[in-house]
Image (tube, grey):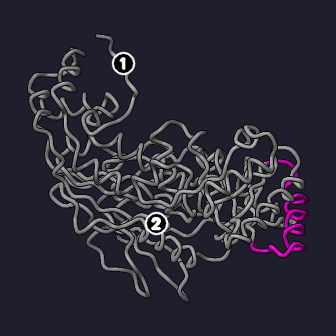
Amino acid sequence: MARYPSLGLVTPENIGLLVDLYELTMADSYLRHGLNQKATFDLFIRAPVERRNFLVSAGLETVLAYLEQIRFTDEAIAYLRSLKLFSEEFLHYLRTFRFTGEVWAIPEGEIFFPLEPLVEVTAPRIEAQIVETFLLNTLNFQVMIASKAARVVLAAQGRGVVDFSPRRDHGADAAMKAARASYIAGCLGTSNVLAGMEFGIPVYGTMAHSYVMSFSDELSAFRAFARDFPHNSILLIDTYDTLQGARHALTVAREMAEQGLQLRGVRIDSGDLVVQSKAVRQIFVEAGFPHIRIFLSGDLNEYKIADLLARGAEADAFGVGTEMGTSADAPSMGGVYKLVEDEMGYRVKLSAGKATLPGRKQVWRILRDDRFFQDVIALRDEPPPAGETYPLLAKVMENGKVVGPGEPLSAMRKRFEERLAMLPEELRTIDAASPYPVLQSPRLAALTEQMYRVVASS
């Protein structure tokens, strides 16, 4: 029987092997040497990200689902055995592998900054090590997309933004996560129907030029679509001539009005969007149809949207695809996962440019006049700084089980909206700004300095 080629999809059955090889070789060595006591790892964005005044937490729900479900199947273990690298003791250990640790994390939709632990994992060392690759893969990507989408939403100045990215995203998994992360960061929804079903995100769509070209003329295409979708008609008007397309859309709008219906809008995907959108708006207003929405798309990003609006473009919403789904101007996050504490005490790394902070932590956000003032990274058991504060990290998993009920995307989205309003004005822009102050508590700073001296002299 012919065997179909693999689709290359990550599934609950094979997800255990979504690791870098060295996670498993280290884990095997840990087991052989009895090094499986509890250890704590911090996951954080190491350095400032160019053109990002702030970052948006996204992807935690995916991480928690993975930690609860990760298993190594007989097929996975057979493959590992075929590599002739691993001890039979380790392969036997993997048969009953479960994540049993504790996780603290910054909730999704929260705004955070480099060096602040996004996730902190405390678990037997082998468990904490094996999950590293998946956590970095998931959080680096979703934080990257959410942070990019937040900038696009800011540039739109209250107008809607829809994720149009799945056809340009870097794979099927990326398309799903991009839709989810961009929705958390304020987008109206996505064109990705599977993401709509899986995550409950609103789905949006219009039509392609091929639809218009499939009819004998543009007006016939518009009439057919409006007849088939009378409550969801957004017509693409730039296949041939945009202004003539607007007039054809107006004809359909009049015919729908006679039946007690409304044309929802039109989309312009090419040409001089400022000139054309103004002319189209004028056509609709003069005809007594000011309610027809104008939707702009076509290789947009936050800079182009800001420029369009500055030059007076008429737009009720934007469709943004490639540049948002790939975070084209900053296509990586630089998140890392580092050991900070184990059975021997606090741990630090001193590599040039890559030094770490020791110990289990909490991040305190200090507010002033209901705005972010500064953040303080502290040790977990320290009291909060003086003044109005709130903690960023919360316990989300204990003994390998999620703590409390799951949080809906709507709550994450609302958190982002509230936090965005609390950002200092100079950071709430797509232009570069001075870095937001992230400090170490005096106790953490003193401990770090002491650890650096001890480790450097050892």
Query: Which residue is depicted at the point 34% across and 62% down?
Result: 105
- Asked if residue 148 can be seen in this view, the reply is no
- The residue singled out by tag 1 in the image is 4
Q: Which mark is residue 296?
A: none
Q: Residue 117 in the image: x percent, y percent?
A: 39, 59
**Which residue is at the front of the view, 206 or 346?**
206
Query: Which residue is depicted at the point 39% across and 79% down?
Result: 390
Q: Is residue 40 above or below residue 421?
A: above
Q: Which residues are magenta?
A: 270-291
Q: Is residue 127 above or below residue 393?
A: above
Report the Cα–Cα distance between label 2 and label 1: 40 Å
Q: Is residue 390 above or below residue 21?
A: below
**Of pointers 2 and 1, the one earlier in the residue sequence:** 1
- The residue singled out by tag 2 in the image is 109
The residue furthest top is 1
Query: Which residue is depicted at the point 39% across and 28% down?
Result: 8
